[in-house]
Amino acid sequence: MYSLMGHVFLMRTSITLRVWGVLMSSHKLLLPPGSKALLMGNEAIARGAIEAGVKVVSGYPGTPSSEVIMSLSEVANKLGMYVEWATNEKVGFEICLGASFAGIRSLCTMKAPGLNVASDSIVSAAYSGVKGGLTILVADDPGPHTTQTEQDSRWFAELSKLPMIEPSDPQEAKDFTKLAYELSEGLKLPIILRTTTRVNHTVGNVSYGDVVKLKRIPKFVKDIQRYVRASMKGNLARHKWLNNQLSKAEDIANELGLNKVLYDGKVALVTDGVVFNHVYESVRKLGIENKVKIIKLGLTYPLPKKFLLNELSNSDKVLVIEELDPYLETKIRALVQSEGLGIEVLGKESLGIPLEGELTPSIIAAALSGVFGKVVKEIGVTEVKVPPRPPPMCAGCPHRLTYYALLKSIRKCGYDLNEVPIMGDIGCYALSYEPPYEAIWTEHAMGASIGLAIGLKVSGYDKPVIATIGDSTFYHAGIPALIEAIHKNIDILIVVLDNLTVAMTGHQSTPESEITETGRKGTPVPIESLVKDLKLKFFSVINPYNIDEAIDTFVKALKIHGPKLIISRAPCALLVVRKGGLIGNKRYIDHDLCKMCYLCITEVGCPAIHIIIKDHKKYPVINEELCVGCGHCDYVCPFNAIKEVSKDG
């Protein structure tokens, strides 16, 4: 292990290859040191946590970070590791921080918007510091591929005054995770491990290292000034302590080898994270290795000034190549100017590098070609143009039927659909913005649907206002807004779409689950147990597959003044199918009865129904392999042309 400039913590020993082999199975995360395995970046982070001796892992599902906890949950029991999803990111972080206070190494995972949720506790943690190493995995999503914002979390490191390190590939993802705990305990601070989607989801060969075995007994020592933020004088003292700790970060980072240099040319290319790979590939393809010096920053906050000044001192020019915001460019430009180096710094605007989206080798090669006068060659994978195919809700999805019934009830109450706002939230059900439903009007942030609905109503809006929110999102951030609606007697209808799982991010457990991913027996906390004693004006639990009952229930609720809540509950259809079940009997279309009105397509929008052309006619057809027997198409058919497939075939 690394000597951290005299830093000594509790004794640690490496598990020997023989003992490791005896204890562990053949799971790829548990292979012995010296092994190599093909790992996704998130799996590599999980292995890094294992090698670092982490004992507590928590967080909230969020693509592209989810697979870290999903992977660790498969081996947690064998390792004696606590690995569980939390109600939200703030709770997850606080669990990890509490373990860290007791000297136990912990890992908290989240995607970029989750960092916003946890920020209150994270910023305060910089003042308290840690005892056991604590790493905060934050997965940004340039693109974006699965996220409502292209957040650049590098700025958050500066806001929170927490060191940030950035791996560029699966091997570094594993190595940097392990090194993060040395840095964390050396500085006594949480460390932010920032990744992007390409690092999280890239697959590569990863070489395994030794597994650290930490003989630590949890112990929490009372220290008022350190842990209690009520003292303003104490906070000032801790701020000074924090700034002093940050001043040590660069030396420790350099000792750990987090910052690297390739080549020795006169033009410095400064980069970080996954962009390093594209820069490296572009330089080689253009044949300019002898002209450049690639400076790869593994520590991006605090900026390693001594390292940079040393590497830039003999450079004629600096090119800063990074995704999203000109974060490094701003810092390096200020550094060069303050030190009077007189070196030209080129970045986003001058190199023509976009502020949005992912960078590719072709984009970077074009930028470098403009500087070096090279002709751009085809670099990287050729982009293939494919027709746009927006993701639909799955066949038999209960959310589809909930929105169908909700829209029908609005019309049944005499309103135009354009008069009654449906505030959406984060989850699978957000796909209801697409045809044929075009149901939700907003999708803002976790739990925001209820607050937005309240705001619209108190502004004086004189038509019904509806908020739809998923079960996991309700637990995550919807409860405070519900309390607000009830306390202020706001006339809104809240519909909780409860499919008993966190479906969009990979079917993680919710507080309703009896058993967690690691087999921990939990006490289910059903939503109705939380709201039954609240003074709602109307409350009901419906099964969305019973469409008529669902419509009638929504109609009743819309006619009542005050806060109303309806739970629309049915299990995720995908989970039902994966367990070998069906919602009901599969359906087929009897073309002798079918009049080709296409209501089964235009009103349902199920991916199991498509069109075939036969005898110059367009016939709707149900793909029996995709059908789960929900009966929605059968319900809307006015000619009884959709029949159940007989059980005997």
Image (cartoon, grey):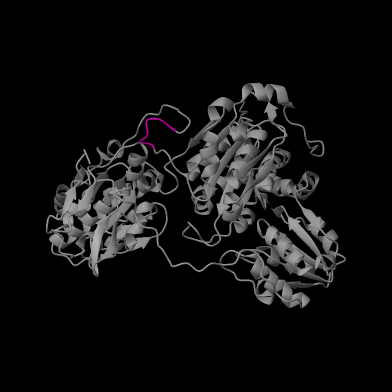
Q: Nearer the viewer, residue 269 or 539?
A: 269
In the drawing, does residue 322 fall left or right of residue 529? Answer: right
The residue lying at 55 percent from left, 30 percent from top is: 76
Is residue 226 covered in magenta? Answer: no
**Front-most of residues 40 and 77:** 40
- 352 or 540: which is nearer to us? 352
Q: Position of residue 39 (x, y in %)?
A: 61, 43
Left or right of residue 236, residue 517 in this image: left
Above or below 425: residue 45: above
- Res 48 quadrant in image: top right
Q: Residue at x 20, y 62 (%)?
A: 599
Relative image position of residue 40 (x, y in whole percent): 59, 46
Front residue of 218 and 81: 81
Residue placed furthest toward the right:
314
**Number of marks drawn:** 0
**Most prominent secondary structure in the magenta stretch?**
loop
The x and y percentages for residue 431 are: 36, 58
Q: Quadrant of the C terminus?
A: top left
- Percent across and percent down for residue 139 are 56, 51
The residue stretch that appears in magenta: 511-516
Work out which residue is located at the far front of the displayed protein and give it: 615
Asked whether the viewer can see residue 424, the reply is yes
Would you place residue 585 above or below residue 158 in this image?
Answer: above
Q: Is residue 531 left or right of residue 145?
A: left
Can residue 561 be seen at all in this image of the molecule? no
Image point 70% across, 43% down: which residue? Answer: 175
Q: Is residue 216 left or right of residue 436?
A: right
Determine the image quadrant of residue 343. bottom right
At 60% from the left and 64% from the top, the residue drawn is 324
